[in-house]
Image (spheres, rainbow, N blue to C red):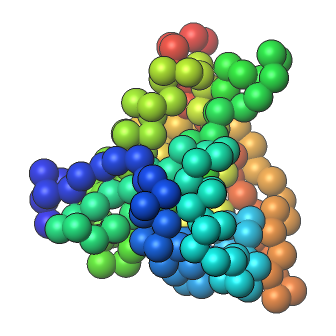
Amino acid sequence: MTTQSIEIRRLLPADAALYRDIRLEALRFSPEAFGSAYETESVHPGEWFADRLTSGAVILGAFRDGELAGIVGFVAAEGPKRQHKGALVSMYVRQASRRGGVGRLLVESALEFAVQSVELVQLAVVKGNEPAVRLYRSMGFVEYGLEQHALKIDGRYYDDILMTKDLVGRD
């Protein structure tokens, strides 16, 4: 797979069924990577997913040959004291598309979108997800903290590595 064959674009309400499929797959196969749960979101109809694509986060999709290979969200913080920053959320790349540059293209596209409105981008990645941590580090994100016991699934705790990227080059 070459990255030239991948199209990145914002998902629209017309993409709700595709978004629902990949979102539920992400929650099912990587539950430790998301604050929500498959059991919570799988009961929602397509309209609920369509609404999510028009409010809150901007969701970008990576398409390869018409198939949705990955997603990432960007949420700008609200309020006068926090509007200078935003967060990357809900990053997921389907197994068949991993290690082919899809994740990098998604993050690059999200950062291109973010730089139009914020100065700083933050994210949380589950401790132990080394491929994701390496990707984020290679793109200029730095660790600034660890949220211990960020999630608890079936009696097991998962920690989140907190990372940030300054988009305006301040020290």
Reply above or below: 89 against 39. Answer: above
Which residue is at the far bottom?
Answer: 154
Q: Nearer the viewer, residue 44 or 140?
A: 44
User: Residue at the location (69% across, 77% down)?
Assistant: 44
- Which image quarter: residue 29? bottom right
Residue 10 left/right relative to 154:
left
Q: Position of residue 133 (x, y in %)?
A: 51, 54
Q: Is residue 111 visible?
A: yes
User: Residue at the location (56% across, 61% down)?
Assistant: 50
Q: Position of residue 160 (x, y in %)?
A: 72, 58
Q: Is residue 26 visible?
A: no
Q: Position of residue 49 (x, y in %)?
A: 60, 66
The image quadrant where one finds the N terminus is: bottom left
Q: Position of residue 151 (x, y in %)?
A: 80, 69
Residue 131 left/right relative to 143:
left
Reply above or below: 21 against 121. Answer: below
Which residue is at the far top?
Answer: 170
The image quadrant where one finds the C terminus is: top right
Image mark count: 0
Reply above or below: 85 against 53. Answer: above
User: Residue at the location (14% across, 57% down)?
Assistant: 5
Q: Nearer the viewer, residue 145 or 6?
A: 6
- Which image quarter: residue 113? top left
User: Residue at the location (48% across, 21% down)?
Assistant: 116
